[in-house]
Image: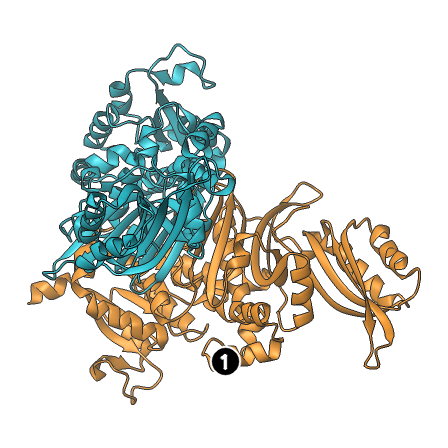
Chain colours: A orange, B cyan
Amino acid sequence: MSDAKSNEIGVAVLGLGNVGSQVVRIIEESASDLAARIGAPLKVRGIGVRRVDTDRGVPADLLTDNIEELVSRDDVDIVVEVMGPVEPARKAILAALEQGKSVVTANKALMAVSAGELAAAAESAHVDLYFEAAVAGAIPVIRPLTQSLAGDTVVRVAGIVNGTTNYILSEMDSTGADYASALADAGALGYAEADPTADVEGFDAAAKAAILASIAFHTRVTSDDVYREGMTKVSAADFASARALGCTIKLLAICERITDNEGQERVSARVYPALVPLEHPLASVNGAFNAVVVEAEAAGRLMFYGQGAGGAPTASAVLGDLVMAARNRVQGGRGPRESKYAKLPIAPIGLIPTRYYVNMNVADRPGVLSAVAAEFSKREVSIAEVRQEGMVDEGGQRCGARIVVVTHQATDAALSETVAALADLDVVQDINSVLRLEGTTE
Amino acid sequence: MSDAKSNEIGVAVLGLGNVGSQVVRIIEESASDLAARIGAPLKVRGIGVRRVDTDRGVPADLLTDNIEELVSRDDVDIVVEVMGPVEPARKAILAALEQGKSVVTANKALMAVSAGELAAAAESAHVDLYFEAAVAGAIPVIRPLTQSLAGDTVVRVAGIVNGTTNYILSEMDSTGADYASALADAGALGYAEADPTADVEGFDAAAKAAILASIAFHTRVTSDDVYREGMTKVSAADFASARALGCTIKLLAICERITDNEGQERVSARVYPALVPLEHPLASVNGAFNAVVVEAEAAGRLMFYGQGAGGAPTASAVLGDLVMAARNRVQGGRGPRESKYAKLPIAPIGLIPTRYYVNMNVADRPGVLSAVAAEFSKREVSIAEVRQEGMVDEGGQRCGARIVVVTHQATDAALSETVAALADLDVVQDINSVLRLEGTTE
């Protein structure tokens, strides 16, 4: 018995929400398979929760609210952190690493701000720090980027990495609903939280963009480095215009390697809603699904698709990391270390070559289009497509016109200056919306 | 200088075709990046080729036709085998492993027959044996299956893993061409070899199915265990019928875990052309692209998409493995070992639940459909859809009828018995084609 026990890999699970309870269930139900794959049985030593007094569907003696004590136990080899948010997770993980435990975390907010500190602690202690579940749930993206593409040069990563906003935008696209009612639907179905700010304002996607950019470009990128716009202003009218242009609208996380005017290579990481041509592989990723497109010099374009959230899918990613960390314990090795040698500077948004879609109300008189077009040409922004249509008031009288402009590629700085100048024109009544167009390079 | 050299990771590359020359190029061009990622520089010690007398675009002193000597050199740490086919690659890889070199191979034919022998040799020598490039070129599938999904239970893997046949089938679908002219086009564009047998008869896909089934189900599966049908008999008429049924036709590699009538879990691995509903994610994978759909209990459905062949994409996968093997050398660890504990028996094709599409010419008289339907119902095969149309001869006279039947799910044995019985019916003139329907379970 004591022999069997000494062979066990002790696991502490921090958090018993959707993901944590699935992790505990799978460790239990797949025990013999996992033991065969690892070479030793996994044993949950304890589960850290905020309150131990509720019935949580697990043996009560496993529950503890003393996380510091739990991660310090001698019989804990690996700590699985699935509680979020940044604190107290950060402190618990640091304590675990410093005491020689390997750590598996699904905490994107934490990894997007503290990856450097945590990786250094893992390095000092010669243990593993895995975080596949922090980006795109069950979809393997961290491991493909850090390992499968370790010999290639990644040029670009573009993904739909937030299921809540993708559900809302898919609804708006397919039903013509406006943002508020699509959000309400998402909430009713459990796809949106009571306070959806982290999702709809792009904070969640920005954390994931920071993690993806860090590993894709071997450079430290944190949440603060990510340019971010939320998707709450996307309107039903934008979807109608997008459709007329052969596009849909998606909230994208984009990580790109660009070369600035001085020849300096830089990393751009950004999150915003953008028009995407219907023929682009990301355009058909609907509902709560996630997908990540990776472009690398030798591999070309790869796409990874699947469920980006939810208890069981996220637990699948956590369990994969847990089995690998446990195997390394048994075999006496480690997974790949952090690779941040490239240290590329961050590119400010103004430098980024992009395309704009501008939707504005204008006075309905001759010369307006010419005045509008002049503002683009003054800044050397080339127009790809213009659509102009008359507007009628409630009485059926013409009361103005709407112009939609889609540009060719220019720097974001030139484009945003153009929009500011348009807003100052007398003939422009309202700038209804400004969105970028991604997935083309013309 | 000698210090620098002792730090180098020595690489022998076997083969200098499309893939090998890209591997050598990338090692050269990305030298400083690769060194930073590995923690030591890679150095190509020699390149094994069949003939050294031709100008190959690499320093002549690297070339050797003595592969045995090359893999045995003391200054070679890792052997990259990209020469194919089974021999002499097998012998060279075994020699390398036995001498403590790690091995990276893109050789699917070899891995599909000799994985057990090679893995045992790697295990004895405590070295790595990586083969990401053997399946689906640049697309990471081996690593996601063996690592990311190590804690999950894979239920099914279905993929388009042969670019040549997918190009041909995509052409037939989009242009209405017949097999012979689509094959000729593929040959002219370099997508098909002079002897396309390995591709069009499904041998290449079967080798990949064996590898995928082995790792997905922790069970040894070899090429001989894979049920295989080629796609040379798929006709333009089949595509027309498929389209009428809302489907296209793809050559699929399918690996599945099934439970037989006695409750025994078994592994099925099979390759054949099949109807796929247009809304299935594999239906829109066109041209020379590959995609693999993985279904796992916790993760749900994942899809991996990209370029499945070609020099640079395959080299990307090889380089990823090479960097990981080199890192393990530097850090003093190993990647995950083979996991074949499950030892599930192979399911014969007759046991497999599937759906059939049967296209036949029949006599144009009353009672024929009833006679045809009776053969299905006798074997408890339920019909999902029937289409019957009259046929006219050159003079415009009716000369018979064509019946297309699509069944619900039944065992392959029951379905193939039904087809045999139909062929014996007097009223059935010809069985034009029999294809399976995948991607639905009704």
The type of residue carrying mark 1 is Gly
Task: Report x, y in % for residue B391.
Answer: 41, 44
Q: How many marks?
A: 1
Q: Can residue A130 be seen in this view?
A: no
Which residue is pictured at 56% across the width and 68% down the height?
A174
Q: What element carries label 1?
A: helix
Q: Nearer the viewer, residue A280 or B200?
A: B200
| Chain hosting mark 1 | A
Quarter of the image with the N terminus of chain B is top left
Q: Is residue B45 at all visible to an observer of this figure?
A: yes
Q: Horizontal and vertical percent for residue A164?
A: 50, 71
Mark 1 packing: few (<14 Cα in 10 Å), some, or many (20+)? some
Decide if residue A47 is on the left or right side of residue B28: left
Task: Tell me which corner region of the image, top left, top right, bottom left or bottom right, holds residue A44.
Answer: bottom left
Figure quadrant of the C terminus of chain B: bottom left
- Image height of A168 relative to B201, above or below: below
Quadrant assignment, res A306 = bottom left
The residue labelled by disc 1 is A187
Residue drawn 45% across the image and 47% down it: B285
Task: Residue lying at the far right in this picture: please name it.
Answer: A366
Q: Can you give x and y, in whole percent of width and height, for residue B392 in the image?
A: 43, 41
Q: Residue furthest top?
A: B53
Check the image and name the residue furthest to the bottom: A53
Left or right, B393 with reference to B148: right
Residue closest to the eye, A117 or B17: B17
How far across and how far down the image is residue A292, in percent?
48, 55
Q: Nearer the viewer, residue B183 or B147?
A: B183
Q: Would you place residue B136 above or below residue A64 in this image? A: above
